[in-house]
Image (cartoon, rainbow, N blue to C red):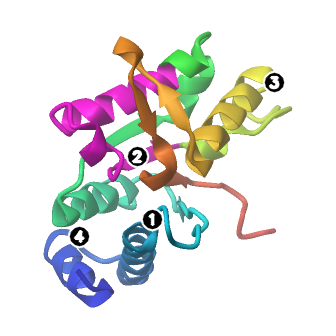
Amino acid sequence: MTPSQIVKFLDQHVVGQDEAKRQMAVAVYTHYKKIELAGPDRVEIVKSNVLLIGPTGTGKTLLCETLSRVLEVPFVTANATSLAQSEYVNEEIEAILQRLIDKAQGDIQRAQRGIVFIDEIDKLRAGGGERGQVRGTSGEGVQHALLKIMEGAPVKIKDARYIDTTQILFICGGAFVGIEEI
C-alpha cells in the first residue's frame, strides 16, 4: 500500500490526528519498503523505528492497532513502566516477542514482520526524581534491553527457537511532558 492508501484507511477508523496519520503512513511504508528491498545479495539498509509523542488519550495505541489491521501484520503492545518494575527484564521482553509469535499463529516469519508498540517509553529515564518516573538501574536496564532488540537482533525464545527482530517495526509512545519547553 502507498502512504496515501494507508492514510485513507486510517481516516475511516481514526478521528483527527491528520498529521500523525500522514507521518505514520510514510514511516510504515518506508519500513516495509526497506524490508522488501533488503536481501542477502543487496546492500544492507539501516533499520528504523518510530517514536509517537502525545498526551495520554490522544489515540497513539489506536493508531498503531489500526495500522497493523490495514497491513495485516501481527501486533502487540507493552507498557515500559511494567517492564521496568520486573526483576526479569529479558524474560519480559522475550514474552512480548512470544506474544507476537502467538498473534502470528506460531508463524515466526510472519511475526518477524509485525509491529510492537511500547507505551510510556518516556517513563524510563534514569536518575529521575519526579513523581511517576521510574528511577535507577531498572529503567536503564530496560533501555539497554529494548535498544538491543529495536536495533535488530536474534532473540532466543521458548523451545530454543529464535526470532530476528531486524524486520519488526517498533513504535514507542509517550507523553514526554515538558518537551515543548525544550
Give the residue number, with chain letter if any, for mark 2: 116
Q: Are marks 1 and 3 in contact (CB under 8 Å)?
A: no
- The single residue placed furthest to the top in the displayed view is 87
The mark that comes first in sequence, 2 or 3, is 2
Which label sits on residue 136?
Answer: 3
Local secondary structure at mark 1: loop
Give the residue number, with chain letter if any, for mark 1: 39
Q: Distance between the residues labelled 1 and 2?
A: 23 Å
Q: Are marks 4 and 1 in contact (CB under 8 Å)?
A: no
Neighbour tally class for label 1: few under 14, some 14-19, many 20 plus, Cα within 10 Å = few
- The single residue placed furthest to the right in the displayed view is 127
Neighbour tally class for label 3: few under 14, some 14-19, many 20 plus, Cα within 10 Å = some
Local secondary structure at mark 3: loop
- The single residue placed furthest to the front in the displayed view is 41
Q: Distance between the residues labelled 3 and 4?
A: 37 Å
Where residue 147 appears, as percent x and y from the top left, is: 66, 43
Where residue 88 appears, as percent x and y from the top left, is: 58, 12
Magenta-colored span:
92-119
- Left or right of 97 on screen, residue 130: right
Three-letter amino acid code at the position of disc 2? Val
Which label sits on residue 88?
Answer: none
Three-letter amino acid code at the position of disc 3? Gly
Q: How far apart are marks 4 and 1 (CA)?
A: 34 Å
The mark that comes first in sequence, 4 or 1, is 4
The mark that comes first in sequence, 1 or 3, is 1
Q: How far apart are marks 2 and 3 (CA)?
A: 25 Å
Where residue 149 appears, as percent x and y from the top left, is: 57, 40
The mark that comes first in sequence, 1 or 2, is 1
- Left or right of 3 on screen, residue 55: right
Q: Distance between the residues labelled 2 and 4?
A: 19 Å
Q: How far apart are marks 1 and 3 (CA)?
A: 40 Å
Give the residue number, with chain letter if any, for mark 4: 14
